[in-house]
Image: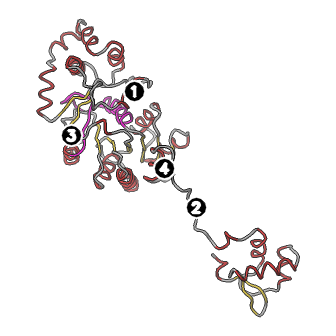
Amino acid sequence: MTASDADRLARVALTRIAEPGHVGLLGLVAATGAEAALAELSADPVLGPRLDAVDPERELAAAARRGLRFVVPGDDEWPPALDDLQTAEPVQERGGVPLGLWVRGPLRLDQLAGSLAVVGARTATTYGSDLAADLAATVGQAGRAIVSGAAFGIDFAAHRGAIAVGAPTVAVLACGADRVYPQAHQQLIDHLAAEGAVVSETAPGGAPMRVRFLSRNRIIAALSGGTVVVEAALRSGALNTANWAGRLNRPVMGVPGPVTSASSAGVHQLIRTGAATLVTSGEDVLELLGAAGEHVLDIPRGKDRPRDALSHLQRRVLDAVPVSRGAPSTSVAHVAGLAAEEVHATLLALEARGMVEVDDDGWRLAALAHD
């Protein structure tokens, strides 16, 4: 199924009169359809002249020359996960299913089911960057795409981790998909455009603006099967993405940092309030993203010790045996508070296990019992 040309052209025109995530416009389109919404707004004395100045066919042709395609609801490539935005409550007056997404790159958006969003601080520490890269690499090696925003810090590390293992990765920008932001990441974004995908709700040529970052965050959350936050201060924009993921009933995960680190304070707040599940590795993330019974992890435990195989009675007697200088079994029985006969039999059993030994003075711990 592919959207009609009239619907696509109407959506192109509408992208030119409102900011991405404008709940009023997107609500009208959801209720009436793009063509009817365009007709209604064309009659508006303020918006009508602006719409008359838009030539959507020429815009599509110009975008195509820059390697962009406009993916809209009804296209085969349209990811159904984005439709979940229709029922999610707006955040800071931004929300709704986008009119469409401008895409640059060979990776199709309908291949992002089960992908992972990795977001976090722009001023990331080495600890955070290394963890984000390792986590993205592990999840990427399992065949899942990595979605982020191509920003400094955690975003860059996540893309780098995915690229290192040949995993697909997508950057969702707050400017036009034909632009590069930040400019320092020209090489990264060019690589994503050649091997993965660069995506934006903002029309081509659009500049990065604060409000567009907030709108962009909902796209990152909706495209992904889950979101993990690696380092985020209490007012970090990454928390907005996590908020959207929670509203969309996607798994929200947080990587803890040092309790004294302001860079991780926002993550710790998510975990403390139950808004995020604590994860420390890509394996943890895969267990949460996977279907029931998939990527199940063993419960971590310490190394087995020889004492673990002892009975309660044997442990009680062993605790009463001196460490260096031996003691008779009657002395051990006195310390253990048990009958001498019972203790003597237990000491013989412990000796057979290599846990105790006898010297000239009596029983003492063997080297194996110190583990």
Q: Which amino acid type is shown beneath numbered disc 1?
A: Leu
Q: How far apart are the two marked residues, 4 and 2, measured between alpha carbons? A: 16 Å
Q: Secondary structure at mark 4?
A: loop
Circles 4 and 2: CB distance less than 8 Å?
no
**Mark number displayed over residue 29:** none
Compared across the picture, whether 150 is left or right of 326 comes to left
Compared across the picture, whether 323 is left or right of 29 comes to right
Q: Counting residues from the N terminus, which is met first, the one under dot 1 or under dot 2?
A: 1
Q: Is residue 64 magenta?
A: no
Mark whose residue sits in front, 3 or 4? 3
In the image, is residue 4 above or below residue 246?
above
Residues drawn in magenta: 195-223
* Residue linked to disc 4: 279
Q: Which amino acid type is shown beneath numbered disc 2?
A: Arg
**Depth check, front residue: 105 or 256:** 105
Q: Is residue 200 magenta?
A: yes
Q: Which amino acid type is shown beneath numbered disc 4?
A: Val
In the image, is residue 282 above or below residue 320?
above
Query: What residue is shown at x 20% (from left), y 37% (from top)?
Result: 104
Q: Counting residues from the N terminus, which is met first, the one under dot 1 or under dot 3?
A: 1
Query: What residue is shown at x 20% (from left), y 47% (from top)?
Result: 191
**What percent of the width, then of the height, locates residue 33?**
30, 15
Q: Which amino acid type is shown beneath numbered disc 3?
A: Gly
Q: How far apart are the two marked residues, 3 and 2, measured between alpha carbons? A: 45 Å
**What percent of the width, then of the height, locates residue 205?**
18, 30
* Residue linked to disc 1: 85
Compared across the picture, whether 128 is left or right of 322 comes to left
**Mark number displayed over residue 105:** 3
Q: Counting residues from the N terminus, which is met first, the one under dot 3 or under dot 2?
A: 3
* The quadrant where residue 127 appears: bottom left
* Residue linked to disc 2: 301
In the image, is residue 167 above or below residue 215?
below
